Amino acid sequence: MRFLLCGCFHGKVPTNFFQVIKKENPDLIICTGDFGDGKFLRKWEFKHEKEILKLILSGDEEKVEKFYNTKENLKYVKKDLETAKRVLNKLKVIKNKFYFTYGNHDGSSKKLLNSLSKKNFKFIPKGKINFSGYTLIFHGGYRGTSGKPYLVDWKTASRKHKNAVKERIFEINYELNKLFNKKQKNVIFITHDPPYGTKLDILKKNFDSKNRYKHIGDDIYTKFDKKFQPLVHICSHMHENQGYDKIGKTLVINSGALLEGKFALLELEKDKIKRLKFYKNKKE
């Protein structure tokens, strides 16, 4: 069984992606999200970084939402949505089965993703699906660094924000407990964010100096990997960390960022890893 693994398009679909699909003819393409460019929103967030952090730590979600819905930001959201639409329209021509979830840059694109979902081109935000003897568990989205307790400044965070972090932790645990059980075999866990504590979640880029060289993945995912030991955990998000690692018996794969020409091919034979190949931009 051949799975093509991809994520983090950010407005681009490199030619070699289609070439590999034609050559390898995967049984299923699994995508971890981030279709839109994202650079417009990132530019706006970095511009207002201090204001946004202050609002988040205050715990006033209404004010955070109001700040994000300013005329300036909505203009950027619209541009990102347009790039997501272009990517998805290119992907729709693929005849192989294509199952996808959403990433941290797809919040404004979820309606679009859902509207394009059909039998072979299927959007699975959170859920479980059986595929040819494998159980695919999708958990899309992103908790964000401000929602991870080990990255929260508890001295400056308000009680309201601390409670919001705790509620989010409870919510994710509840969602995943409904999806996982120990009777399932050949489980493939699909998330956007990598699990915490492997070589795949170390921040190497210098856009966040406070957290540079720290593990910034999701510790709840690590907990479920350790407890249920899925066969494979597929993720992306950390563009710089294409590769694999292990959590117990679970093979964790970061497919890399497709906008940089990075993706992966995974071939399984029941519960055995037959082949794992990473594709990279030839210029690297």
Image (spheres, rainbow, N blue to C red):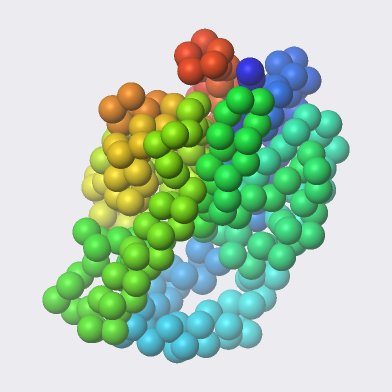
Q: Is residue 274 left or right of residue 171?
A: right
Quarter-of-image position of residue 106: bottom right
Task: Tell me if residue 5 comes above or below residue 23 in the rendering.
Answer: below
The percent position of residue 262, horizontal first and vertical second, equals 56, 31
Quarter-of-image position of residue 92: top right
Residue at position x 34%, y 72% from top? 167
Q: Which residue lies furthest to the left in this view?
A: 155
Task: Tell me if residue 44 comes above or below residue 18 in the rendering.
Answer: below
Task: Tell me if residue 68 comes above or below residue 105 in the rendering.
Answer: below
Quarter-of-image position of residue 80: bottom right
Task: Tell me if residue 253 comes above or below residue 165 in the rendering.
Answer: above
The percent position of residue 115, horizontal first and vertical second, equals 79, 60
Q: Is residue 8 left or right of residue 132?
A: left
Whether residue 50 is visible here, answered yes or no, is no
The percent position of residue 190, horizontal first and vertical second, equals 51, 41
Residue at position x 62%, y 41% from top? 129
Residue at position x 65%, y 55% from top? 36
Q: Which residue lies furthest to the top in this view?
A: 274
Residue at position x 33%, y 24% from top? 249
The percent position of residue 74, horizontal first and vertical second, equals 64, 77
Number of labels in the image equals 0
Q: Is residue 28 left or right of residue 44?
A: right
Decide which of 112, 211 is in the foreground and name it. 112
Locate the N terminus by quadrant: top right
Q: Residue furthest front?
A: 183
Whether residue 116 is visible here, answered yes or no, is yes
